[in-house]
Amino acid sequence: MSQESESESTYTEGDLRNTGMQLKHDREWDYELDRIIDAIEERDAEKVGLQFPEGLKRRGPKVADDLRELADDDVTFMLSGQPCYGACDLDTYLMKRTDVFVHFGHSPMKNTDKVIYVPLFSNVEVLPIMEEALETLEDPEETEGVGLVTTAQHMNRYEEMSAFLEEHGYEVHSRRGDERLTHEGQVLGCNYASADVPADQVLYVGGGKFHPLGLAMEHPDKHVVIGDPVNNVVTVADTEKFMKQRYASVHKAMDAQKWGVIFCTKIGQGRWDQAQQILENNDDAYLITMDEVTPDRLRNFDMDAFVNTGCPRITTDDGPQFYKPMLTPGEYEIAVGNKPLDELSFDTFHGTW
């Protein structure tokens, strides 16, 4: 199935052009169909689960169609309809009922024989936006270098990006953050440990505002430049608006009497020790267990405020949508008077399940 010419042999593993497996309906991603089929045949699988993140669910049926054409007729493919926001968010119900379970769109957070992770490397060119980012980065002769970070979708271009910066005179600093991260230089929406490098500026190559916002909050002493190769724009991370939102939520919660302590039951998002500590120190705190945390699900609880020990993005992305203040564990400590307001910081997630 895979056709590779001599001129293509230098492409990074996972690049679309390295596999010859481009789908007719979508030429931006490599779904690694041959690797999935090999696993199905090796395990004599009859039931295969396919899980896609929210933004890619619409492509699931077409990927299933392509796999059906390559697999034996007795193989059943099942699409997960559960919400999925990261490698920490596996559909464990479907996973337990399939012989092969494929999780698309994220790098593995924990090694497992049951799950095949397909990160969906993008083949979008990154050097043009990096060229433009040079105008926003500080001069290499006036800095201690630059930290380079990106998301799982662009990790296949990381060496290329690093070499580009070095060619332009920068000393590139990179590291693998902790066990929650798969690659050197990778960041997650809840973990920016890879940016903890001895450089006073960081270049984030990728889409979206949340990752660079988290970077800037986690490392306030660093100049964070955003190079978005998909939307073709270079900006500088600005935390002022976000900080105002969070300060407002903390102030609203300072008068709260009854607290709902949310423990998320998703496999990679539960911080049980943190939830227990809050409950032990507050007689007016009540544990609420949930898989999917939404404003509607919390509306019927008679609480004055909530503290979320699950995914930090529930608070930071959706916080303003909740009818009562929704705080991170650190913000909770400020609201109840255990910490001063100037210790407000970004909530990050470390460790796996």
Image (cartoon, rainbow, N blue to C red):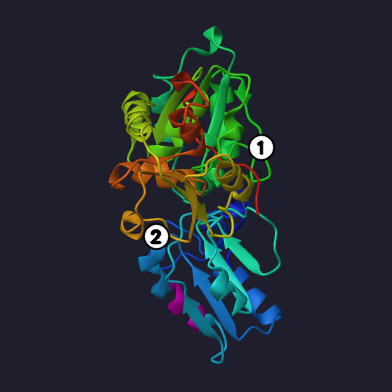
Q: Main secondary structure of the magenta part?
A: helix
The answer to which of 121 and 210 lies nearer the viewer is: 210
The kind of secondary structure element at disc 1 is: loop
Residue 170 visible in the snapshot: yes
The kind of secondary structure element at disc 2 is: helix
Tell me which amino acid carries mark 1. Arg
- Which residue corresponds to mark 1? 176
Residue at the (67%, 55%) spot, across then down? 110
Give residue 54's mark: 2
Instruction: Find residue 121 and report its horizontal and vertical position in percent.
Output: 51, 53
Q: Residue furthest top?
A: 142
Instruction: Find residue 69 and report its horizontal and vertical position in percent.
Output: 49, 83
N-term-proximal mark, 1 vs 2: 2
Q: Tell whether position 67 is magenta.
A: yes
Instruction: Find residue 32 and report its horizontal and vertical position in percent.
Output: 56, 65
Q: Quadrant of residue 128?
A: top left
Tell me which amino acid carries mark 2. Glu
Asked if 289 appears above or below 234 in the picture, the reply is below
Asked if 93 appears above or below 68 in the picture, the reply is above
